[in-house]
């Protein structure tokens, strides 16, 4: 399973809640926050994934998050 697959699965599992890049990095034990950021930006705008400013469901901080809205 690729990093992108893992990020996609985590976001879909939390759907419709949003998650920030820092929490993606922490939950998936990625080596750098930039990995979570890069992969979430890859997903944004495709197949019901959207990035926006909101509260992260896990850390409760207001920041850029991503979520999946099932179609």
Image (cartoon, rainbow, N blue to C red):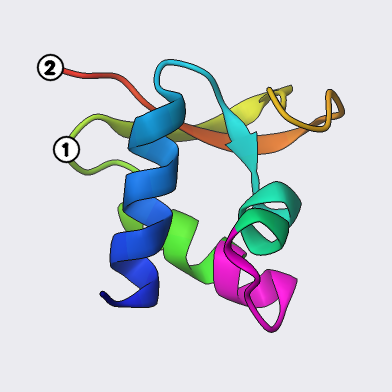
Q: Quadrant of residue 29?
A: bottom right
Density class for disc 1 (Cα within 10 Å; few <14, some 14-19, many ≥20) is: few
* SS under mark 1: loop
- Residue 29: in magenta span: yes
* SS under mark 2: loop
Residue that numbered label 1 is attached to = 47
The numbered mark at residue 69 is none
State whether residue 31 is above or below residue 71. Answer: below
The answer to whether residue 41 shows anywhere in this view is: no
Q: Is residue 9 left or right of residue 17?
A: left
Residue that numbered label 2 is attached to = 71
State whether residue 10 is above or below residue 54. Answer: below
The answer to whether residue 47 shows anywhere in this view is: yes
- Residue 25: in magenta span: no
**Residues under numbered marks 1 and 2 in contact, where contact means CB atoms less than 8 Å apart:** yes
Could you give the CA–CA distance between mark 1 and mark 2, rounded to whole angstroms?
Answer: 8 Å
State whether residue 26 is above or below residue 48. Answer: below
Q: Is residue 56 left or right of residue 62?
A: left
Magenta region, residue range: 28-36
Give percent across and percent down for residue 19: 61, 35
The structure residue drawn at horizontal position 42% and vertical position 15%, both measured from the top left corner, is 16
């Amino acid at each position: 399973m690729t990093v992108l697959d893992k990020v996609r699965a985590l976001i879909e599992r939390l759907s419709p809640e949003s998650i920030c890049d820092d929490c993606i990095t922490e939950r998936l034990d990625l080596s750098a926050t930039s990995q979570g950021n890069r992969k979430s930006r890859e997903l944004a705008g495709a197949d019901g994934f959207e990035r926006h400013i909101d509260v992260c469901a896990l850390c409760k901080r207001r920041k850029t998050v991503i979520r999946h809205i099932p179609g």
